[in-house]
Image: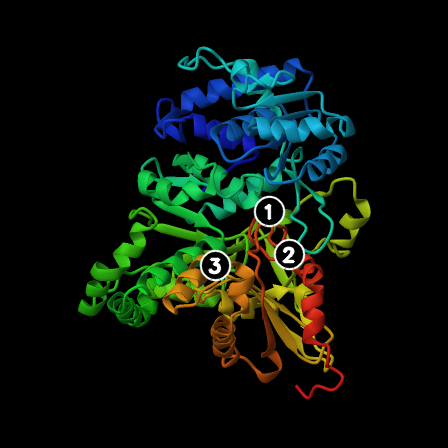
Amino acid sequence: MKFDLKTVNDVFFRACSGGEERVMQWRDAAGKWQPIAGRQLYQRVRALAAALSGWGIGKGDRVALLAENRWEWAVTDFAVLALGAVDVPLYSTLTAQQVAGMLADSGARVIFVSTAAQYEKVAAIRAQTQIEKIVVMDREPAVTQAVWFGELLSPDEASAERDVNFDRRAYDVQPDDLASIIYTSGTTGESKGVMLTHGNLASNLNASTAPYSWGRQDSCISFLPLSHITARHVDYALFCHGATIAYCSQFDLLPQIMREVRPTIFVGVPRVYEKVRQEVLRRAGESKMRLSMLQWALRRGRKQHDALLAGRKPQSASWKLADRLVFRKIQQGFGGRVGTFIAGGAPLGPDTAGWFLDAGIRIQEGYGLTETSPVIALNSGLPCRMGSVGRPLSNVELKIAADGELLVRGPSIFKGYWNKPEATAESFDSEGWFYTGDVARIDEDGFLFITDRKKDLLKTSGGKLIAPQPIENQLKADALVANAAVVGDKHKFVSVLISPNFPALETWARGQGIAFSSRKELVANPAVQAAYQQVVDRVNATLANFETMKRLCVVADEWTLDTGELTPSMKLKRRFVEQRYAAEIACFYADEATSHR
């Protein structure tokens, strides 16, 4: 379906056009799903915009959001943009000092927070910012120095009456007007505020939504952080198509919510798919019969890749049997109704993509950056090409630099970095091409393949370049591995740090009769060390000799967003990991001068 959006405000008006049709769902305190119709959405956004305007918020002013995914997030976003103001979404997991830095840098005057805990975070650093008003979405009696979100909404949400002045103001917003400042997750350095205009976002939506024909019969769970451009882009696309968005504010509730909502569209970062795969393997491993059945079914599925990539349902009797006995059960983990699976935010990896294809699930991998609004390429056509991120969107140009870096140009490329003119200038060449920082290739049919981050490439002391991400993705395909970091830049050989999938490891250890009183004791056990060495050996067997991991360290830590090793989109913060485990890495290379490896 093709759209001709000029600004994000056009998305809002499309979302409201359904009148009584349900456009959102949210889960109340009793766990019941409550609908929000287009008419209600309009009145809530209009009322909130009026409140903001009454506080002097207008074109170009910055308004911050510090909240988990919930309907109030979308209402706030639309209200801010309708005024021509600029929203500054912040990850709910940021520390108080990180929030202080971004609020001070952006000059935000108002901030919307979700809970009392988020309020306390802002209150502690408010003096370091220009914040004039704090709005709390939850009604918290103990919070007395803030405005309750509910007080700002219209009491007459059922009204069909439109506000002509509000509509005119929203339609007066222009494509070149700044819409959002999104701070990058900082995988390789300091966070920077990416400036995206209404035109950037609208252009990307027009191109990326064209292949899909979703409608009011479709639904999707919004659980990836809306402070990340991928999740926000997906929600905008769903609003355009009239699909229902169900908000999930807690990631640990996702399995239950998938069973309740039974979405028809699923969009996740690769780590979510990896966790599903590992859980399937863990459960199958509890019984020799189940494991044998799963392996048999996956072999049947592997023979049907061409049909699945072309969007056809295989017709062989053996595949139908495998589907009935095994694949449908895997589908039930997503609710049982998903017709479109999409992955973005980080590299999916051909091993994970291939495993799901074996199981009858074709994942459409996409690629983009915050700076590109975000989608550059998407595997939405037929046939898909496994391992690629699809063909580029119609509104962008691509070229590969001499050193392999992907460059991109087009109307969805960002305006620049907020308050950082030098960083902005360094991001573009003289002809306006944006340096993505990713190493890529384009095949003869126009499919784009991302091989690694340019800054992540390891160069051995022998001059060999090694891309760590594909190796790490192979390691993570094993049920015992949650995350991995290949290290060894400027050394003779590469080594690897592995953070275990502790639930799977602990189950395996008990089955082996291994006693342990702590994770540190568990990972130090010789049998555990041997098991992970086998994982590394299996991956090494697929690599060139210079790429093979010569040494291994299984750490006693789970790498998470909260502990700092992962970004909000579950990408590895490689520099952070290298600093945290500097002693372990030093041990890898203590004898390097005399080692013959």
> Which dot, 3 or 2, sits closer to the camera?
3
Residue 30: x and y in percent read: 36, 27
Give the amino acid at mark 3.
Phe
Of the numbered discs 3 and 2, the one sitting upstream in the chain is: 3
On residue 562, which mark appears? 1
Of the numbered discs 1 and 3, the one sitting upstream in the chain is: 3
Q: Confirm whether residue 574 shows in the render.
A: yes
**Residue bearing mark 2:** 573
Which element carries disc 2, helix, strand or loop? loop
Quadrant, the C terminus: bottom right
Give the amino acid at mark 1.
Asp
Report the Cα–Cα distance between label 3 and label 2: 20 Å
* Residue sitting nearer the eye, 525 or 333: 525
Q: Are marks 1 and 3 in contact (CB under 8 Å)?
A: no
Residue found at the far right of this picture: 422
**Residue bearing mark 3:** 502
* Residue sitting nearer the eye, 128 or 186: 128
> Which dot, 1 or 3, sits closer to the camera?
3
Residue found at the far bottom of this picture: 596
Rendered residue at 39%/68% (across/down): 513
Residue 123: x and y in percent read: 69, 26
